[in-house]
C-alpha cells in the first residue's frame, strides 16, 4: 500500500522465481459492506467498478473477463508467469464523481513497492529507542503509524469491525474509531520513542475533537473528529466464524465514562511534561474539563469497559477522576499556570478519600464497584498512575487477588463477565492490555523476574508479522477481537521501554505525573 496521496492504491506483484507457474485471478467487489454489486466495465484499457459514491480501478496487463450473474458475479483471468517475469496489479479507490488521476500505473508498480519500503524504513529509523526489544518496539510503532489517518492524524483503535471476542458469540464491536482513552498511552509511546511530530499531531487532533461544551465530551470520535457514530447491525453478513451480529458504528459513543476526563487531562499533562511545547489552548481545555468534572465525579457511569448494563459507581472511574485533579494541580506547580489550585487540591483529596473509603473491601483489595467484591483488572492502574505507591499493602493485595482469581493461562481477564453488569451474554478471552499492565505493576513492585517472564510470553503471542489483537484465548491458543489493536501495541512500547530504563514512561507516570 503506497503512502497515501489523494487516492488509495493497493499494489500486488506476481514474480516468477523459477520454472513456469499458471496463476488464477479472481476479484469479487461488493461495496456497502457486501450489500451492493457494482457496475463493472472496461475503460481506457483498465477495469472499473462503480456503485454510489465508490469507484475502483484495476490496472494490469492481464486480460480480464466477467463470469457469473447477480450475486455470483466476479472478474477472473488466467495467466502464466515464468522465471524472471513480473506481472503487476494496481487497484485504486477514488470517489466515483471524481476522475482517477493519480493512481500508480502497472508499469510503475515495482517502483511504488520500493518507494513504500524506503518510506517506512526511513520513518522507523527515526525511533530513538535502542535496547533489548528494539525490533519489537519499532514494529509496534509502525502499527500505530499505520493506524493513523494521514489526512486527520486521528489514530483508530483497530482497522477492523466485529472480529469476535469469543468465536460464535455476540461481543463483536466496531473499533475503527478514535478513543480518547488511548490518548495517554499513545502519547507516552510516541514520545518515548522519539516520534515527537506524531505525538504533537495526535495532541492537536485530540484538542480539535474535544472542542466544545465539556458536558458533550464523548469517549470516542471518528477519524476526523466526527461525533455521530450510530451503531447498526448488518444482518446480510454471516460474521467471522459465524459470529454475529456484525456491527457498524459504536453506541458506546453516547455513554458517560467518567475516566476519559482523567485520560484527556493526563495526556495533555504528559505531553507538556515530556517535551512538547506547552499549549495554552490545551491548558484552557484542561481547566474547562475539570470544572465540569468537579460537579460530575460522584455520578455513576458505564466505566472503562463500556458496559451495556446499568450505570454503576466504578472504582476505576473515580481513580481516573482523581488523576484529572492531580494532573491539573501538578501542571500549575510545574509550569506556573493560572487557576484555583487550592480548590483543585481539595477536590483531589476528596476523591482520594472517597475511593479508599468505598472502593476497597475488607480484604484490603480494590474492587470493581463501590460496595461489591468483584475484581477488575483496571485496578492494576492504581500504582501505574500514582494513586498509591506500589509498596502500599492494598496495591499488593489487589495484584495478588488478580493473579489468583482473574487470570487464565497466566494472562489477565478484564473481569468475570456477568450479564447483570455488562448487559451481554457470553464470555471473552484474556485482555492483552491488562496483561501488560500486570507486567508493569510487577516491575514497580520490584518483582522484575515475574514481569520480564510475563512480557516475553506476551511478545510470543504476536503473529508471524508481529501483530497483536485485543484478546487471546489460552485454551484454543488463538488471538481474538479486532486486529491489529493499538492498545496492545502501545503497551509493547511502554512496557519495553520501562523495563529497559530506570525511569521509563511507567515509572514517571507512577510518580503522580
Image: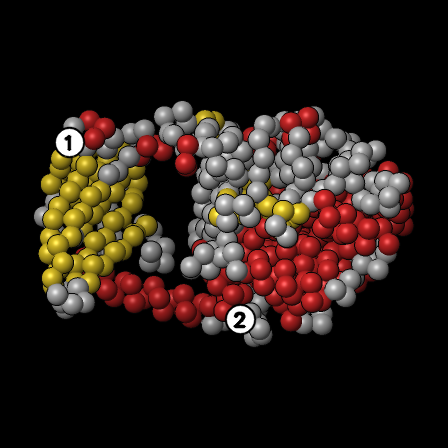
Q: Give the camera-side residue of 382 and 112.
A: 382
Disc 1 on helix, strand or loop? Answer: loop
The extreme bottom residue here reads 130
- Look at the image and tell me whether residue 156 can be seen: no
Indicate which disc, 1 or 2, sits on the residue closer to the N terminus: 1
Q: Residue at x 65, y 34 (%)?
A: 417
Q: Is residue 96 left or right of residue 373?
A: left
Q: Give the camera-side residue of 239 and 30.
A: 239
Q: Position of residue 497 (x, y in %)?
A: 63, 67
The label on residue 185 is none
- Look at the image and tell me whether residue 27 can be seen: yes
Q: Which residue is mark 1?
A: 68
Q: Residue at x 23, y 64 (%)?
A: 110
Q: Position of residue 467 (x, y in %)?
A: 47, 56
Can you tell which quarter of the image residue 384 is in? Answer: bottom right
Q: Residue at x 13, y 35 (%)?
A: 67
Q: Is residue 488 left or right of residue 302?
A: left
Q: Residue at x 11, y 62 (%)?
A: 20
- Looking at the rendered image, the quarter that the C terminus falls into is bottom right
Can you tell which quarter of the image residue 500 is in? Answer: bottom right
Q: Which residue is mark 2?
A: 134
Measure how far apart labels 1 and 2 are at the Cα level: 50 Å
Disc 2 on helix, strand or loop? Answer: helix
Q: Position of residue 313 (x, y in %)?
A: 77, 33
Neighbor class of circle 1 (other Cα within 10 Å; few <14, some 14-19, many 20+) is few
- Looking at the rendered image, the quarter that the N terminus falls into is bottom left
Up-down: is 271 above or below 349?
below
Q: Position of residue 422 (x, y in %)?
A: 65, 30
Amino acid at each position: 500500500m503506497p503512502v497515501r496521496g489523494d487516492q488509495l492504491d493497493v499494489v500486488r506483484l506476481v514474480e516468477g522465481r523459477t520454472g513456469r507457474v499458471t496463476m488464477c485471478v479472481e476479484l469479487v467487489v461488493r461495496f456497502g459492506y457486501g450489500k451492493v454489486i457494482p457496475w463493472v466495465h472496461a475503460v481506457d484499457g483498465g477495469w472499473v467498478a462503480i456503485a454510489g459514491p465508490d469507484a475502483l480501478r484495476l490496472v494490469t496487463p492481464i486480460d480480464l473477463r466477467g463470469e457469473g450473474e447477480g450475486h455470483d458475479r466476479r472478474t477472473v483471468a488466467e495467466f502464466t508467469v515464468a522465471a524472471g517475469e513480473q506481472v503487476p496489479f494496481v487497484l485504486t479507490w477514488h470517489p466515483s464523481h471524481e476522475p482517477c488521476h493519480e493512481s500508480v500505473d502497472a508499469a510503475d508498480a515495482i517502483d511504488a513497492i520500493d518507494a513504500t519500503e524506503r518510506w517506512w524504513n526511513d520513518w522507523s529509523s527515526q525511533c530513538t529507542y535502542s535496547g533489548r526489544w528494539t525490533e519489537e518496539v519499532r514494529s509496534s510503532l509502525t502499527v500505530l503509524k499505520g493506524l493513523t489517518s494521514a489526512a486527520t492524524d486521528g489514530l483508530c483503535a483497530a482497522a477492523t469491525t466485529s472480529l469476535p471476542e469469543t468465536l460464535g458469540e455476540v461481543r463483536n464491536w466496531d473499533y475503527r474509531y478514535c478513543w480518547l482513552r488511548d490518548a495517554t498511552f499513545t502519547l507516552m509511546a510516541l514520545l518515548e520513542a522519539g516520534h515527537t511530530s506524531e505525538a504533537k499531531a495526535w495532541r492537536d487532533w485530540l484538542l480539535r475533537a474535544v472542542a466544545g461544551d465539556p458536558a458533550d465530551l464523548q469517549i470516542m470520535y471518528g477519524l476526523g473528529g466526527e461525533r455521530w457514530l450510530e451503531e447498526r447491525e448488518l444482518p446480510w453478513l454471516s460474521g467471522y466464524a459465524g459470529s454475529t451480529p456484525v456491527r457498524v458504528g459504536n453506541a458506546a459513543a453516547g455513554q458517560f465514562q467518567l475516566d476519559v476526563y482523567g485520560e484527556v487531562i493526563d495526556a495533555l499533562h504528559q505531553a507538556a511534561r515530556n517535551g512538547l511545547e506547552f499549549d495554552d489552548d490545551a491548558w484552557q481545555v484542561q481547566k474547562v474539563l475539570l470544572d465540569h468534572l468537579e460537579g460530575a465525579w460522584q455520578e455513576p457511569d458505564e466505566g472503562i469497559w463500556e458496559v451495556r448494563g446499568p450505570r454503576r459507581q466504578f472504582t476505576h472511574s473515580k481513580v481516573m477522576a482523581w488523576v484529572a485533579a492531580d494532573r491539573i494541580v501538578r501542571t500549575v506547580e510545574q509550569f506556573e499556570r493560572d487557576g484555583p489550585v487550592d480548590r483543585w487540591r481539595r477536590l483531589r483529596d476528596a476523591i482520594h478519600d472517597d475511593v479508599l473509603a468505598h472502593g476497597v473491601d475488607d480484604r484490603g483489595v480494590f474492587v470493581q464497584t463501590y460496595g461489591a467484591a468483584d475484581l477488575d483488572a483496571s485496578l492494576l492502574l492504581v500504582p501505574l498512575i500514582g494513586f498509591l505507591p506500589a509498596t502500599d499493602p492494598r496495591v499488593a493485595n489487589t495484584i495478588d487477588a488478580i493473579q489468583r482469581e482473574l487470570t487464565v493461562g497466566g494472562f489477565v481477564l478484564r473481569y468475570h463477565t456477568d450479564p447483570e453488569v455488562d448487559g451481554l451474554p457470553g464470555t471473552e478471552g484474556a485482555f492483552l492490555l491488562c496483561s501488560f499492565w500486570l507486567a508493569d505493576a510487577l516491575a514497580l513492585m520490584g518483582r522484575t523476574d515475574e514481569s520480564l517472564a510475563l512480557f516475553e510470553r506476551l511478545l510470543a503471542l504476536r503473529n508471524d508479522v508481529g501483530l497483536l489483537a485485543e484478546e487471546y484465548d489460552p485454551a484454543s491458543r488463538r488471538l481474538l477481537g479486532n486486529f491489529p489493536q493499538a492498545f496492545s501495541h502501545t503497551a509493547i512500547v511502554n512496557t519495553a521501554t520501562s523495563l529497559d530504563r530506570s525511569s521509563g514512561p511507567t515509572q514517571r507516570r507512577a510518580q503522580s505525573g
